[in-house]
């Protein structure tokens, strides 16, 4: 039985914890494009990153992972001296990983509905509905998140959908309040552009750019779709460092 790309990425990331040298072979180091602004380009940056993280007594857990064509996207728990939640995205070409994006956030306590940032279903269902679910999430992101048409929320979401954002409770009313919230006259959460939508069956990841409290930020939103509506949501939000602090020239997206 052949090893899936998801398992290859799981082993690669787990090697941060175990120190196993073999899994890094999945990366084409000569062609590897790094989109984490805090990591140097290519094999040198990857080696330095793994060496640095290995000194923290790391713990790595892949909670859920999916494949979409040449892409693998995974929802991760990390403990690198502090506990973090991350989405990892890898693009494959000719059997190896050649490009990488991520979005990482400090893990926080369960939200008002008692949900953590990672609990809930982990396996994709309805594989035959992948493209329908991708279209649903793209329409939701462009109509509600970017264009701000909050009246359309019921068209896309189950009324009491499960929310895993650490600051929000379940349901449409809580999401509406969060998207309406302002800080000193500015939108607290402001989506500007959708960059990528990745999907496998009932799970869809939306990668977007905008501002959080006026600060340039990246938003990774994972949705679980059931019966044509958004039934569950996980996310990470990361502030994007100023261009002067980037260690590569590839950009966050």
Image (cartoon, rainbow, N blue to C red):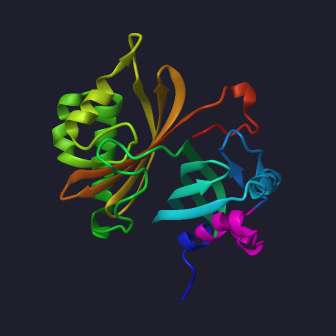
90 horizontally vs 140: left or right: right
7 horizontally vs 48: left or right: left
| Image height of 195 relative to 66, above or below | above
Asked which quadrant contains residue 125, the reply is bottom left
Decide which of 73, 61 is in the foreground and name it: 61
Asked which quadrant contains residue 104, the reply is top right
117 horizontally vs 56: left or right: left
Decide which of 234, 197 is in the foreground and name it: 234
Point out residue 88 in the picture as x, y percentages from the top left corner.
Answer: 56, 54
**Within the magenta stretch, is there residue 25?**
yes
Kindly give the residue lying farthest to the bottom in the view shown.
1
Decide which of 55, 42 is in the foreground and name it: 55
Task: Please state, as top left, top right, bottom left or bottom right, where the C terminus lies in the image.
Answer: top right
- Predominant SS along the magenta part: helix
Task: Please state, as top left, top right, bottom left or bottom right, where the N terminus lies in the image.
Answer: bottom right
Give me the residue at 44% from left, 32% from top. Answer: 193
Point out residue 171 in the picture as x, y percentages from the top left corner.
Answer: 22, 42
Give me the residue at 23% from left, 29% from top. Answer: 150
Point out residue 227 in the picture as x, y percentages from the top left corner.
Answer: 18, 59
**Within the magenta stretch, is there residue 11?**
yes
**Which contiguous range is marked in magenta?**
10-28
Kindly give the residue lying farthest to the top in the view shown.
185
Q: How many marks?
A: 0
Point out residue 54 in the picture as x, y percentages from the top left corner.
Answer: 76, 58
Residue 68 showing in the rendered view: no
């Amino acid at each position: 039985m052949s090893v899936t790309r998801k398992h290859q990425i799981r082993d690669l990331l787990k090697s941060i914890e175990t120190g196993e040298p073999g899994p890094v072979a999945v990366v084409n180091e000569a062609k590897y494009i790094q989109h984490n602004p805090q990591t140097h380009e290519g094999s040198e940056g990857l080696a330095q990153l793994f060496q640095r993280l290995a000194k923290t007594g790391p713990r790595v857990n892949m909670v859920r992972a999916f494949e979409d064509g040449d892409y693998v996207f995974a929802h991760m728990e990390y403990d690198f001296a502090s506990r973090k939640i991350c989405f990892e995205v890898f693009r494959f070409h000719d059997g190896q990983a050649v490009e990488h994006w991520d979005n990482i956030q400090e893990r926080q306590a369960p939200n008002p509905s008692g949900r953590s940032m990672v609990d809930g279903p982990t396996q994709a269902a309805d594989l035959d509905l992948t493209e329908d679910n991708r279209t649903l999430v793209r329409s939701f992101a462009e109509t509600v998140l970017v264009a701000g048409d909050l009246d359309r929320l019921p068209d896309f979401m189950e009324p009491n959908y499960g929310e895993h954002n650490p600051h929000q409770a379940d349901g449409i009313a809580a999401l509406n309040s969060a998207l309406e919230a302002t800080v000193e006259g500015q939108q607290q959460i402001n989506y500007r552009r959708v960059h990528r939508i990745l999907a496998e069956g009932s799970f869809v990841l939306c990668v977007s750019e905008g501002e959080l409290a006026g600060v340039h930020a990246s938003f990774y939103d994972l949705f679980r779709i059931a019966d044509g509506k958004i039934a569950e949501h996980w996310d990470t939000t990361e502030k994007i460092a100023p261009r002067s602090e980037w260690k590569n020239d590839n950009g966050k997206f």
